[in-house]
Amino acid sequence: MKKTKDENTEEQILNAAKNVFQAKGMDGARMQEIADKAGINKAMLHYYYRNKQLLFEAVFNNAFSLLAPQLNTVLNDNSSIDEKIKNFTSNYISFIIKHPYLPNFIIQELNRNEDFIMKLKENKSFPNIEKFKKQVDKEVRNGLIKSISAEQLFINIMALNIFPFVAKPLIMAFTNTDNEHYKQLMEDRKTEVANFIINSIKVL
């Protein structure tokens, strides 16, 4: 008789895996520990997810499906460019503080799997920046912000938000901070980054 997968068990596995991945990263996580935290045996875990990579991808996809709609909404609402920058930055940083494994997983997969980003783009909630680009171009033409291509502005927003999480160990070493202070630095960046970008494009 064919076994069926139970949604509650799968949710327990994903929650347990998320906690272990956040604490130990992809390389440090062990399937046995995830099984223990989920309250199941390792054989059952392998029935749901054959290997750690598949489980990690499931955890990532689950998290991305929560983050992407937030960012898409920010980029496509009717708010000003300033508000978009503030909201994008605040939403992204808040989410990554809760899911710190996401940026490094994306970098890892981009380097390992050329098809990763194409699969990611198939997600219907994958952020669309076309409206944002048109809005930036219009505000540049109207003299409301300095001359900058929308793509460059978006790259600046992404880079300033993503890098501190990808480079966490390096930043902690340079700034001689512990985890608690690092978290506070990231919280502060919700306003620091937004203000920095807004001031960089402001017409004086």
Image (cartoon, helix red, strand yellow):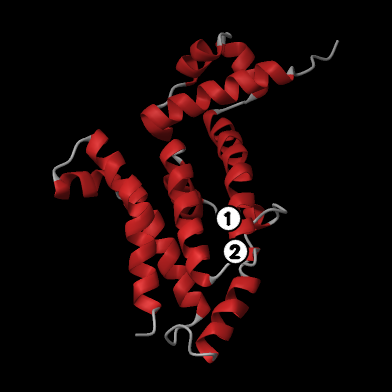
Which residue shows up at 28% across the image and 42% down it?
A: 184
Instruction: Determine whether, in the image, residue 2 is placed left or right of residue 65.
Output: right
Residue 104, x across and y down, in percent: 42, 46
Q: Is residue 159 above or below residue 125?
A: below
Which residue shows up at 48% across the image and 84% down it?
A: 144
Q: Is residue 10 above or below residue 61?
A: above
Residue found farthest to the front: 204
| Mark 1 → mark 2, Cα distance in angstroms | 6 Å
> What is the three-letter code of the residue carrying label 2?
Leu
Residue 83, x across and y down, in percent: 51, 64
Which residue shows up at 17% across the image and 40% down it?
A: 177
Q: Which residue is mark 2?
A: 75
Residue 182, x across and y down, in percent: 26, 41
Q: Are marks 1 and 2 in contact (CB under 8 Å)?
A: yes
Circle 1 residues within 10 Å: few <14, some 14–19, many ≥20: many
Q: Is residue 128 above or below residue 64?
A: below
Q: Which mark is residue 71?
A: 1
> What is the three-letter code of the residue carrying label 1?
Leu
Helix, strand or loop for disc 2: helix
Residue 8, x across and y down, in percent: 69, 17
Image quadrant in which the C terminus is located: bottom left
Which is more toward the observer, 33 or 170? 170
Image quadrant in which the N terminus is located: top right
Q: Is residue 28 visible?
A: no
Q: Is residue 17 visible?
A: yes
